[in-house]
Image (cartoon, rainbow, N blue to C red):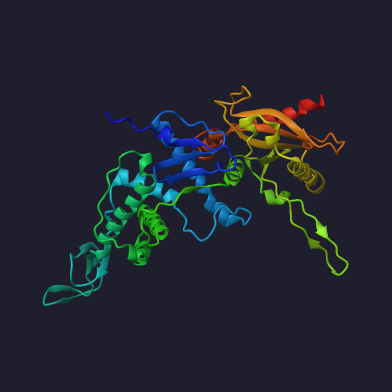
Amino acid sequence: MKKKFDLKDICHVSSNSFNDDYVGIKFLEDGIKVYFPLGYEIPSNNSDCRKSIIKLLKTISIEKKLNKSDSKYSLTKGKDREIPINSFLWIINDYLNNGLYNDKEKIYVKGKNGKINWKKTLNTKFYVSNSSVIYLDTYVEKNTLEDNIITDIHAYCVNISIDYIGWIFGNIPRPNYNNIRTDKINYYIAIINKEFLQSFEDKKKELLLNLKKILEMTGGKNKNNLKNIGTNNYKYIWEYMVKSVYGNLDPKLYFPNSKYKLIYLENAIDSTKLRPDTILEVGKDLYILDAKYYKYGVTKNPSDLPNTDSIQKQITYGDHAKNKINKHEKIFNAFIIPYNKYNNKFGLEKSIEYVGFAKSSWRNSNELYDHISIILMDTRFLIDCYNRQQNNELSKLLASIQKIVDTFE
């Protein structure tokens, strides 16, 4: 009897170490491998594992947003075409629920040949001749060759989507496409663009946009040459998720900066600004969060904690907020580090846990923000929060960070 295929068997949790920092999907000669981020608990059953892989893919798609929004994030190299993960997911889900494209929108044109649409024609100009009504403009239903081509394009894109991620869903029946030539991709994109401009149906326009993204990704190349979907810089995605789930102020408002005053220049020039990750304002209190995709939550090794540079930056952010902005009663600082609440060396089991704080040796200050709380956050919990499947337990995060107050008593 053939052994049941378990998704967990092809899954691995990256350690964020040298040669083991990749997160995503790799298409290897001997099969497919899924790499989860540091601290992720991989579910045992196929149903939950499938959901986890889909959520993981959605976090990988953050790459595109980061590359477009900020030059700080150099997640991809070269000019490789974007792999449209969300389009693959959308196309497969739509195909499983609705089948292949079938144009339900009718297009009407003025003409003599074709099935007359009398409802539209009766509203046009006419004259009477020999007791007969003659319509000057008759509207006929238009059946275009493009409709059939779009159906073939849809089938082609469904097959590409199945090649990339169809194995997540099990055995999906593949549709046939008969007239697609990979050397005419630009022609098919032009057809999609034309149909998009003529369409007024939102669902159809969404389908066309996703088809276009997949066509642009293939670029006429052999679809069997599958590219890996992932990143070696998941730390930026970790930062983005923390900011998306917990941030509620624009960090740019809290960028400390400095200036150079040079004797040969009349005006001072700005130096590079420091950039806090996430700014959270709750009432009159401010929380400055630094998302650190570090190994400490897994290894429990103090050498895997943020270094002095990171501590100094957090203190500087606190000084800037107090002295420059000066509107908050209390200012808290925290590092947010991934860990696995189901399996860890700390004996902890909550999604958010306080495990201590960092403090400089060169400042003799009792400001709250001089003490940076070390917060462990379950990786699977954060990804679920980002995908809007779970409450972010904000009150628990605030309570954990505020445990720093106990150090002053």
Residue drawn at (56%, 26%) of the image: 343
Of 114 and 206, nearer the camera is 206
Q: Quadrant of the N terminus?
A: top left
Residue 165 showing in the rendered view: yes
Of 194 and 43, nearer the camera is 43
Outermost residue on the left side: it is: 130
Image coords of residue 108 (percent x, y): 26, 65
Q: Quadrant of residue 238?
A: top right
Number of marks in the rendered image: 0
Q: Quadrant of residue 399?
A: top right
Of 323 and 303, nearer the camera is 303
Outermost residue on the top side: it is: 347
Residue drawn at (39%, 58%) of the image: 218
Image coords of residue 96 (percent x, y): 31, 43
Q: Is residue 71 above or below residue 165?
A: below
* Left or right: 401 as drawn, with respect to 208: right
Q: Is residue 6 above or below residue 347?
A: below
Outermost residue on the bottom side: it is: 129
Image coords of residue 217 (percent x, y): 42, 58
Q: Quadrant of the C terminus?
A: top right
Residue 122 showing in the rendered view: no
Residue drawn at (65%, 40%) of the image: 292
